Image (spheres, helix red, strand yellow):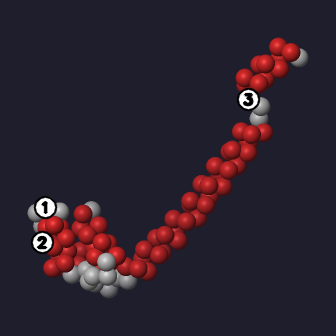
Amino acid sequence: MEYTYAALLLHKLGQPVSEENLKKVIEATGKPVDEAKVKVLVASLRDVDIAKELETATLAAAPTTVAEEEKGEKEEKEEEEKPSEAAEGLSSLFG
């Protein structure tokens, strides 16, 4: 996962995601560099538009978030409409 984070950090900073740059980022954390992971990640990202992929991932997550917010609002309305049990108990005393 650290290697993916390093690649995203490089992308965010406008630096190329290269073996050399990935190694520098990983070494800066104090962790030993796994050459195989670096090579696989760089090869995997060679023809990938990271900005486009991040945008797609964000858009794919957005409908779920909106649906969850709407569900939460609906539950809040239902709670507001129902009198609380404590209020019901008090009304029975004076009813």
Q: Earlier in the sequence, mark 1 or mark 3?
A: 1
Residue under label 3, please give it: 84
Q: Earlier in the sequence, mark 2 or mark 3?
A: 2
Query: Is residue 35 visible in this depiction of the protein?
Result: yes
Q: Nearer the viewer, mark 2 or mark 3?
A: 3
Query: Is residue 43 visible in this depiction of the protein?
Result: no
Residue 64 horizontal/vertical position (percent): 56, 60
Give how far apart the Cα atoms at labels 2 and 3 are.
Answer: 62 Å
Neighbour tally class for label 1: few under 14, some 14-19, many 20 plus, Cα within 10 Å: few
Residue under label 2, please give it: 35
Work out which quarter of the rendered image holds the N terminus and state it.
bottom left
Q: Quadrant of residue 52?
A: bottom left
Q: Give the amino acid type for the residue marked by disc 2 in the picture.
A: Glu
Q: Secondary structure at mark 2?
A: helix
Q: Give the amino acid type for the residue marked by disc 3 in the picture.
A: Ser
Residue contact at pointers 2 and 1, CB within 8 angstroms: no
In the depicted view, which residue is nearer to us: 94 or 6? 94
